[in-house]
Amino acid sequence: MMPPRYIVTTEHQVRTACSANRASSHQQYLVHLKPVQGLVTSDENYQKLGDFLLQEIRAKSSIKYPSLSELLTKLQDALPSKDVGDQISSLLMEQLGGVQYPDDLVTFFSDMSQLMHSHAQALDEDALKGGADISSAMGFYIRHCCVSFHMLAFEAACGLFDDLQAYKEVCMYEQQGFQPPPGLHKTALRNQAALDALLNQQMAQQETQSGKKPAAELIAPADELTDLAPHVTKVDLLRHSHAVCQDDFLAAVDSLYKYFDYSTGQTARPTGGAAGAEPSKGHLQDALLTLGSAHAHFGHVQEALLALNEAVRIAQQHNDNVALAHALSALCHILATASPAAVTQLTEPGAALTDPTAHLSQLLKILKRCEKRAQDLHLPHLFVFARLALAQFALEHQTGPSNQQLAKGSQVAASQGRSSAVLGVSQAVQDTARLHQAAKLAAAVALPPPPAASAPGMVGNVGRATVTDLFTATPPVFGTTFAGSASSADAVEKLAGSSHLLQAGAWKLAGNLSLSQASSLTHLACFADSATAEDQALAYAQLAQVAMSKKGYKAAAEVLALADKHLPYSNSPALQAARLGLVHSRALHRRDVRHAALFASQLVGLADPTDSVSKTIRIDAQQAHVRTLLVAGRYDEAAEAARELFESCTEAGLQVQAVELLLLLGQIHEAAGAPLTALPYVLSCLLHSTVLHMDLLAADATCSLSRIWLAMGPAHGPQAVQQLRSVLPTVLGNADTDLQARVQLVLAQALLADATPAHLSADPEEVLQPLQAAAAGFAALEDYHKAAEAQHLIALVCHAINNTSRRNAAAGEFHKLTWHARQGQAC
């Protein structure tokens, strides 16, 4: 009782009953094509009917086939004229009723073969009255149906006839409003190939829809299919993907073991090895690679390495170059995310601890090798992964000049590092976009048949499509011929979206928040349907950070509210860290130490303690803890914590974070009343940030250096003014509100350091304008202490120039801000 939904395959291994059920669908589906000409009298009806037929052929969104009555209802709704729909439905039922004997099926399919005409015959209008072009999608479908029927055995044809009769009887009962008898009403499941395509689609949706839909809704198809067809083993692989997205380690491993244990030997897949190789070996390599990826996702570095090492060993024994390339990319991912101390099996015991630079050099070497192998094997998704990973590596681990280089005057040459890294990210994004377009075009074109098995000792399997089919295989128009290239194109599309997130981070490091925001918006606007939920959450987190920097906490809260609306079920660490970072920064500006310490501890708890998944959240959390200690006035503890974090970042090769911590150490000593102790840290940060083209960090270091000059005496005021004015265009053009307000306040203080009443009376706006800008910026950030300080200076300047009204207004604002400051501390 299989309704007309799926194209029959022509393989001899397909079971007889399954082939009969599939072939029955063609008879029911195409029987009305020949006599329909007298009813469909307009081009619009022809177009609607053709669209309906193609949609029904391709539809694979449900586990069960629809009944005949449901199909007739869809047909009537698809046509613009109800009369035409009713007549076609009646004609279809009449044709089905005309099949009284098995011989009628033979006659029917013989007539179907006469519906085909070639492109040359299509030039004759009379030839178009009876069928479809042999090269069209509908022509391909009809030919496929006819060939499949003629390949059936006699017993299968009889079974087809019996199923067709039962299919009609069920429809008759439903049309008359009666319940079909229990023995007649069967569950019409799709065939195995259609179920595999549906499960592949569901697995792809686990990553993209995990934050948009509840977990129960995402796993519902697996539960339904388990009840209806327990023999379909790929359901366990769907459960594994779901458990990984939900961070359920035990369920993920259990489902993975079940799938590969029960499915071994069910499908023969080419391994690309020597002639006579055992086909199940490719299945074992996929199992080990998937297990290694799962362990890496959960931060189990050693277990992931064990699985990858075993996969590499088996792949080498069978010359499976594609599996080796995937293992190489998985190893690159582990080395890039885990700390050097977490990876100890690749070198001698303890080597990763004593020589951190070996970790980075090994990672760079493996990334380059992965890129080369992916290019040789024509694996676009792995090539894009390696290309973007190399760009990110250059962005994060670009080393600055040594002391000898600076002494020799090679600072200009060395300063090209960060600039070239940012340009390298842009070039990688462009290359990814071009390859994304090429992969999409290649996925829409039929692939040539796979090459024959190579001779012993020779390399094969260049055309093998294996590992990616386990994750994101997309069903093609007909059959499963294009699954490999389609899955690779889907992976490239996801990476193309991720490349814009990398571009946003690069622009942020370069000091251009506007372009960073544009890159994040590009990801959400262009890749919302294909991007993973984690990438979308990261894009919202980036937008929230930029909104907080440019427009304040209210704008950032609106972005996070929008993220909660689009991802209501997301548990993304990036989104949670952005939300905690927002409230922590707000508490620091309000001098609410108690809540700031609470939010900082929550950030620390959110981070991975082993540095096996991501080091960024842990470093940001520890920086938040240090800043909390600084605001609380616990300078010794803050300096000690910052120093330990600086050493950790230096050992891990995280140069950007290390330079930021140099400035933080300088600010701690400056706040402690030791400007001379803070001077070396600030100068070192200024030097490295200038060399690495971190313009905003260099401007922040210049602001701290100017405060140190002022702390040494008013005689250094002109020097501080000169330094601040040199970075003022960069700050006003690209910096966040906090840095702009601090630079404006320090500039006004530097101008007031050696100012006289006569000088102020001559040009008071030179000082009042930066003070007003600083007061407005601090007020927007709810830093009422700094805003009150700026209003206090405005009142003093207005008093010096005898501007009584403006002085009184500034004094009134000062009292309001001090009241808000006390209320903020009491919150």
Image (cartoon, rainbow, N blue to C red):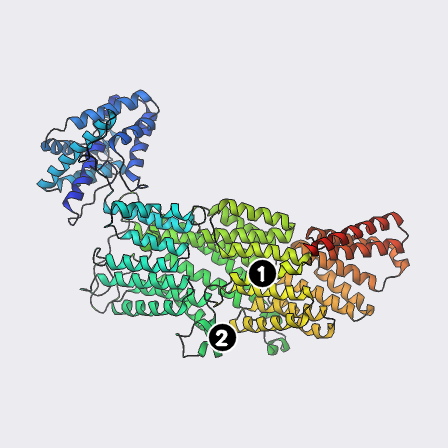
432 displayed left or right of 581: left
CA separation, marks 2 and 1?
23 Å
Question: x%, y% of residue 757?
Answer: 90, 59
| Residue 23 versus residue 503 in the image, above or below | above
Residue at the front extreme, as displayed = 826
Q: Which disc is residue 579 wearing?
A: none
**Disc 2 crowd, CA 10 A, few/some/many (<14, 14-19, 20+):** some
| Residue 433 versus residue 641 in the image, above or below | above
Secondary element at tag 1: helix
Q: Name the residue under label 1.
A: 509
- Indicate the quadrant where residue 762 lies: bottom right
Question: x%, y% of residue 327?
Answer: 35, 65
Name the residue at 26% across, 30% down.
123
- Is there CB contact under 8 Å for labels 2 and 1? no
399 displayed left or right of 662: left
Out of 11 and 563, give the one closest to the viewer.
Answer: 563
Name the residue at 26% across, 44% down.
228
Question: x%, y% of residue 437?
Answer: 41, 49
Q: Mark 2 points at which residue?
A: 357
Regarding residue 463, the answer to whether it shows in the image is: no
Question: x%, y% of residue 388?
Answer: 46, 60
Regarding residue 482, the answer to whether it shows in the image is: yes
Residue at the top extreme, as displayed = 83
Out of 399 and 809, give the one closest to the viewer.
Answer: 809
215 displayed left or right of 737: left
Name the residue at 68% across, 74% down.
680
| Residue 689 versus residue 525 in the image, above or below | below
Dot 2 or dot 1, earlier in sequence: 2
**Disc 1 crowd, CA 10 A, few/some/many (<14, 14-19, 20+):** many
The amino acid marked with disc number 1 is Leu
Out of 218 and 373, give the one closest to the viewer.
Answer: 218
The amino acid marked with disc number 2 is Thr
